[in-house]
Image: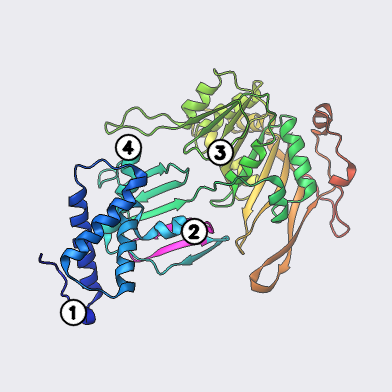
Amino acid sequence: MATPLASNFTRLTSADLLKFKRYLVENVSRSLEGETLQLGDRAEIIKQRLNEVYVQTKVNLPEDIRKQIYTEILDEMTGFGPIQPLLDDPEVSEVMVNGPKKVFVEKNGKVSKTGITFDDDDHVNRIIDRIILPLGRRVDPDSPTVDARLPDGSRVNAVIRPVSIDGPCITIRKFKKDKLSIQQLIEFGSLTQHMAEFIRACVIARLNIVISGGTGSGKTTLLNVLSSFIPENERIITIEDAAELQLQQEHVLRLETKSANVDGKGAVTIRDLVRNSLRMRPDRIVVGECRGGEALDMLQAMNTGHDGSLTTLHANTPRDALSRIETMVLMAGMDLPLKVVRQQISSAVDLIIQQTRLKDGSRKVTAITEVAGMEGDTVVLTDIFKFEQTGIGPDNKIIGELKATGIRPIFSPRLEAAGFKLSGEIFMPSSTGKPQQRR
């Protein structure tokens, strides 16, 4: 059998090995055509066929190179190629492929470049197809971007040429199988015990809460934790682009958006689902992320008896979150005066929790802020808890303190009516802190 590789391996180049690997893949793939394999058997059968094809080539590679090629081919044919080891690594939270020769990962909040590469653009495109085709999605030059969710819940975004100038790109936000608890967030320093007690009381007392934060700041993780406080006897409807929330309650109805078909029809948006959920007798509506006109429907739901709603949005401060909500409401196409929009926001939203990814990679709740009503044309915000940075330690570790501001929220009577008489100690600023003023 003629192979693209000479049996003398002493002068092999990486191009030779690449040709040989492709030759093996083509022959193994050909031998499997027409066979229906169970997922569990597939890897073993591929190993067996791979060995048979390799023996027939009469090529003798050093054992370490042969094993490496076998591993790469198995990852290619049963997983997601070169990035499969990264997806298998529990410490990796995000995988970013910026073209065939640049692969980055996020580990423990820090982004770094790996030594992993793809062969070329076609290799990356094959892996994109392997990821999205089983999910019923497609990507091509006419539709060069795609969002998808892997069976384990991980989020995938892929972009190819001509939109992606430097080659096809893949971004995978890995799904954590073990949901973090509020106690773990306290241990990580994301928030304090007092903040946790306050947030739990707010959720159970059915306050409407918005979690604000930047990309990768941990908004969904925090939303998961807050959702865990919802009582078991309540009917919860979750609405997401890609289902990530892991609610443990029994009475949960999960809704997920749907992309348009090839003809551009049949799309079901977050806004469609929010509107529909109001007809499904929800006790709670949990929207994974507001990013458009659905914000108006959420506000109207909050203002018409559907209290206790939770959602997230992209913003860097609580004040920015209000501006973002205003913008999203206007995106709904309703010609509303800005003052009316702000009145809707101030009467609907009770609390904004700001989640931030700091420069050292750590994630913290940097503000818990009450929406305290209107003064003139301005929505009044009051910080109940605040993170104050005091310096930078070794390894650029940010040093700071999470503390109360000394102000009790105006909605305290609602917490008491729900059975939560929080001690004054929770709202007491530390000895170094100065009470904040309403702003």
Residue labelled with disc 3: 245
Residue labelled with disc 1: 8
- The C terminus: image quadrant: top right
Residue 150, image x and y in percent? 42, 44
Q: Are marks 3 and 1 in contact (CB under 8 Å)?
A: no
Q: Mark 3 falls on what kind of element?
A: loop
- Nearest to the observer: residue 117 or residue 170: 117
Q: Splitting the image into 4 quarters, where does residue 323 fall? A: top right
The amino acid on which the numbered mark 4 sits, given as a three-letter code, is: Gly
The amino acid on which the numbered mark 1 sits, given as a three-letter code, is: Asn
Q: Are marks 1 and 4 in contact (CB under 8 Å)?
A: no
Q: Mark 2 falls on what kind of element?
A: loop
The amino acid on which the numbered mark 2 sits, given as a three-letter code, is: Asp
Mark 2 neighbour class, 10 Å CA radius: few under 14, some 14 to 19, many 20 or more: few
Mark 3 neighbour class, 10 Å CA radius: few under 14, some 14 to 19, many 20 or more: many
Q: Are marks 2 and 4 in contact (CB under 8 Å)?
A: no
Residue 262, image x and y in percent? 27, 34
Marks 3 and 1, how far apart at CA: 55 Å
Q: Earlier in the sequence, mark 2 or mark 4?
A: 2
Residue 136: assigned label: 4
Q: Mark 1 falls on what kind of element?
A: loop
Marks 2 and 1, how far apart at CA: 36 Å
- Nearest to the observer: residue 382 or residue 186: 186
Residue labelled with disc 2: 89
Which of discs 2 and 4 lies nearer the camera? The answer is 2
Image-based side of 357 in relation to 350, left or right: left
Q: Are marks 3 and 4 in contact (CB under 8 Å)?
A: no
Q: Earlier in the sequence, mark 3 or mark 1?
A: 1
Marks 3 and 4, how far apart at CA: 22 Å
Mark 4 neighbour class, 10 Å CA radius: few under 14, some 14 to 19, many 20 or more: few
Residue 228, image x and y in percent? 66, 37
